Amino acid sequence: MKKNNVLAIACALLLGMSSVAPLCAQDRGEWSMTVGADGVSHYLWRGLNLAGPSIQPSVYFDYAKGDWAVCMGVWGSQTLLNNEYNELDLSVEATWRNLTLTILDYGDDYTVPWQEGHYLDFGLSYTLSEDIPVTFSWNSIINQTFEGSMDGGGFDWQAAFPSYFEVAYDFSLSAVDLSLAVGGIPFASEYYESDVPGVCNLNLSAGHEFEFEHGGTMPVSAQVMYNPLHKAAYWGVSVGYYFSLDF
């Protein structure tokens, strides 16, 4: 399910994370591949604290031409303590100018049938401009049924398609990259662990990406997250290493 890391080099998988995060590269030639991993103190995603210390590897293939860019990849998360939580995601992401369409397959249980252990997340996001880097996004799970979606003989689409919306603003101060985000759920959702709708994610992250002469990069970031629906605050730090190859 999930993924979250604002500064990690990533884009969505063949149907997040990553909780945590991640953006497709569009300036490395027509084809490129990015490989790397993040070590995180907490796996934070859309207002939820999914797991403790984890390692989150990823591989992404990018194609960019003109105003178009496509990214396909795989992303995983494995906790380092008592096998608390593990996840393997696939994604496809298509971008045209400032508009991005994402389909993600969150896989968190491979011991049960595919329909039960996978969650297909359909996402749409739009960034105003480079000068006004405000991004509006909407995500909905499209293959699961939650909270008794049949209510009185009628189909309860709100329960059947748990959704999440977010507004994020990215900016820089000196060498520090910052991101402010406000996210919420439009209706009560078992998936997001809330029996009422509302804002579930107030997030501030800060970080910097170190570049090496051989071409690798090391993103370092920290974030604080508050979930008003749960009345709970979380924090997390992340250190990663990535390298890219142009075809």
Image (cartoon, helix red, strand yellow):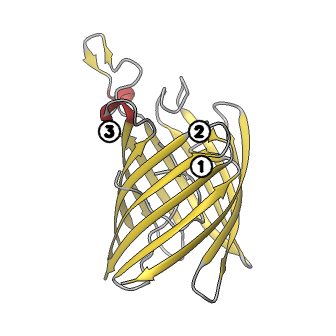
Judged left or right of residue 172, residue 140 is left
Element assignment for label 1: strand
The single residue placed furthest to the left in the displayed view is: 153
Front disc: 2 or 3: 3
The single residue placed furthest to the bottom in the displayed view is: 213
Contact? badges 1 and 2 (CB < 8 Å): yes
Q: Which mark is residue 182?
A: 1
Element assignment for label 2: strand
Q: Amino acid at mark 2?
A: Val
Q: Tag 1 or tag 3, which sits nearer the N-term?
A: 3
Q: Position of residue 107 (x, y in %)?
A: 41, 42
Judged left or right of residue 108, residue 169 is right
Label 2 crowd bin: few (<14), some (14–19), many (20+), radius 10 Å: many
> At x 56% / y 55%, what residue is drawn?
56
Q: Nearer the viewer, residue 205 or 99?
A: 205
* Cα distance between the residues tagged 3 and 1: 23 Å
Residue 31 visible in the snapshot: yes
> At x 38% / y 70%, what residue is drawn?
61
Q: Nearer the viewer, residue 166 or 66?
A: 66
Q: Nearer the viewer, residue 137 or 217?
A: 217
Judged left or right of residue 173, residue 152 is left
| Quarter of the figure that contains the C terminus | bottom left
> At x 45% / y 65%, what residue is drawn?
59
* Cα distance between the residues tagged 1 and 2: 7 Å
Q: Nearer the viewer, residue 71 or 242?
A: 242
Q: Which residue is labeled 2 in the image?
A: 199
Q: Which mark is residue 7?
A: none
Quadrant in the picture for residue 114: top left
Q: Which residue is labeled 3 in the image?
A: 142
